[in-house]
Amino acid sequence: MWVRCLAFAIALWLAGPLPARAFIAYVSNEKGNTVSVIDTDKWTVTKTIKVGQRPRGIEFTVDGKFVLVAVGDDDTIQMIDTATQEVADTLPSGPDPELFIQDKAGKILYVANENDNTVTLIDLEKRTRIGDVQVGVEPEGMAISPDGKLLINTSETTNMAHFIDTQTHQIVANVLVDSRPRFAEFKRDGSELWVSSEIGGTVSVIDPAKHVVTKKITFEIPGLRKEAIQPVGISITPDGKIAFVALGPANRVAVIDAATHQVEKYLLVGQRVWHMAFTPDGKYLLVTNGLSNDVSVIDVAALKVIKTVQVGELPWGITIAKQ
Amino acid sequence: MIRLLVGLVALIALATSALAADPVEVGIGYLRRAGIKQTLSLVEQPAENDGVAGARLAIEDNNTTGKFLNQHFTLQEVHLKQGEDASKAALALADRNIGFIIADLPADALLKAADAIRDRGVVLLNAAATDDRLREEDCRANVIHVAPTRSMLADALAQYLVWKQWKRWLMVVGSHPEDKLYADAIRRAAARFGAKIVQERVFEDTGGARRTDSGVSLIQRQMPVFTQQAPAYDVLVAADENEVFAPYLPFRTWDPRPVAGSAGLEPKSWDAAHDQWGAVQIQNRFVKLNSRHMTAVDMQAWTAVRMIGEAASHVNSGDRKALLDFIKGPDFSVAAFKGQGLSLRSWNLQLRQPILLADGRMVVSVSPQQGFLHQVSELDTLGVDRPETKCKLH
């Protein structure tokens, strides 16, 4: 572990002199049909890119050349060229794509198609559709195990996390969670899979080897009704120590000790907080606030909200990479 | 070699056990009233499969989930003919080992059916009747109410009107018994939330054809006259469940005032325009299956069937007692695209739910409105609450 850490530190050092915050964040604005580009050095929006209808899921490609954004109402995924910051091409996703994930090599894209009860597989190089997996009703959350062997898909009305073998494309297990599971995230060491249930109000911690829920994390905020606490986005620090869970209309991000699964703190952010992403140096966590049209910046070490950046209408997804 | 053999045997055992396990079969009945409601507006005329179309979609959804759990759901539909006895049909479903029946029945028929099958351990899920008395003095331990009550609908509307500061209401009530019940609920809501009914008028149903070739010019003269000389008011609230006059009111009142209740801004459990909280997904699925838009009764039937599916996946069984215990239990909630889980009021088995306020084209708002607080659930600001209930479940 130490060796790997050291190697990582050296790699970082080799990567160049450290104006470490030369990062760029892309935020999808669900209602605005735009993507806001944020410079994390200045914490300002440097560009607003017009995209298709209802942009939600958004990710950098592994090679950093493109930002992929699912535009659900156009039934496609658009590719934003990060050099020109313009839409360059589209991918043949199934109907109403929402969230997606790439394999480690950046070759295959797995897309959840809400309307079709399927997960679509796309060859990123050829930009063609290469297969489908039938899953539950309203597939949404997507994750890949760190060893690349398992693809996880959550289905919102079926209330399950489906475990799909990435080699055979067969479902190998289904784990029942609480109502409306929306997001799935592995710990970096692969020891735990976390799934958020928006309506159930919980996060299920799943043992990925045994396919069982080992712990259900619940949230209690004084003065707030249970119904207002709706967990959505999850981010876990690379060292696996702290997890952040966006609580939707509770307007807070929960800070959880990822080892003990105890909620340590609630950070007040904007209204209807959706999804989040770390800066690559792990110093900041950016979260999208759907109803207040902004992004909150959380200082990860201090566990404090330090900044708010105004973006487009109804920000939803976010992805960050080096500039 | 031996290891290989053992492995092979284990594999065969695994394969046969997977084959041997027959899926758990859950049969759900659907009892439909005879006849179709007539509406004044041609575009609002309910389809022949209103309600049952939602149940069919929920069966599909349950089965998509069921295939991962080895559960299979079927719908046994019974469409009553005019004058046919609902309780006999319910008994016939019970004979076919049905444990749950979705009921689209008027209040009296629903009670008769519920009492007929009580000793058979069959539960009705009321998907259409809004009568408060079914949840109050006439409540039954074997009837779960998925449809909202008139008082829930009236409270949802009242909260919005009060929030909007339209607190002076002119109420126009039809002459049918249902209209009077709706008017009672509106009066109660006005008193609860601080609105004032400045005057009440009754619109007599004198019969006559709903559609005539020269209809519009007559109505244009009738409605302004009917609403003139009213005390100062902010909004006209109409109680007209049989669609005799309310849809004629918007744009025809003597004073330029908005209309709400049975026309204009209507409180309802579902609307084809509702697109928040992932609702687009079910709207799309519904249109794909049925080639038409989804109505409130469709949604209520969908929710009823999904409640059973939700319970079956949680208890991992088709046993009716296990299902019912879970549905009635404290951990039950069903997601129905309303932004929060829907659960049962334990004291009268009414499903708590947000109510949409729709104008026919758009969803204008969703109640409960912000600021209407409650010590247990804000959803309990809609309808009759536990301390007021007359229901005694046996």
Image: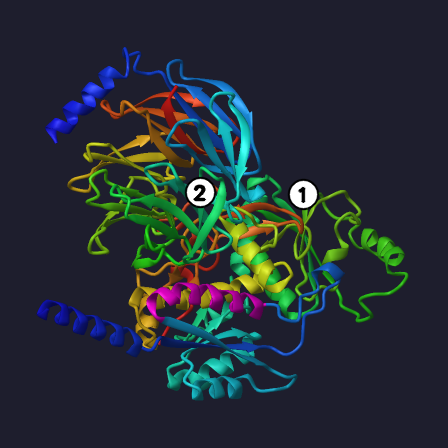
Amino acid type at image mark 2: Asp
Queried whether the magenta region covers residue B66, the answer comes back as yes
| Picture quadrant of residue B130 | bottom right
Q: Residues within 10 Å of mark 2 (few under 14, many from 20)?
A: some
The local secondary structure at tag 2 comes to: strand
- Determine the chain carrying the residue at label 2: A
Of residues B141 and B236, the one drawn nearer to the viewer in this rendering: B141
Question: Mark 2 — residue?
Answer: A123
Q: Distance between the residues labelled 2 and 1?
A: 60 Å
In the shown orientation, is residue A222 left or right of residue A43? left
Q: Residue at x 58, y 63 (%)?
A: B289
Expressed as whole percent of the image width and height from the top left, the position of residue A127 reads 49, 40
The local secondary structure at tag 1 comes to: loop
Expressed as whole percent of the image width and height from the top left, the position of residue A317 reads 43, 34
Q: Quadrant of the C terminus of chain B?
A: bottom left
Q: In which quarter of the image is the N terminus of chain B?
A: bottom left
Q: Give the range drawn in magenta.
A: B51-70
In the shown orientation, is residue A55 left or right of residue A59? right
Question: Mark 1 — residue?
Answer: B234
Viewer can see residue B213: yes
Queried whether the magenta region covers residue B132, the answer comes back as no
Is residue B34 positioned above or below B385 on the image? below
Q: Residue at x 88, y 58 (%)?
A: B218
Amino acid type at image mark 1: Asp
Viewer can see residue B191: no
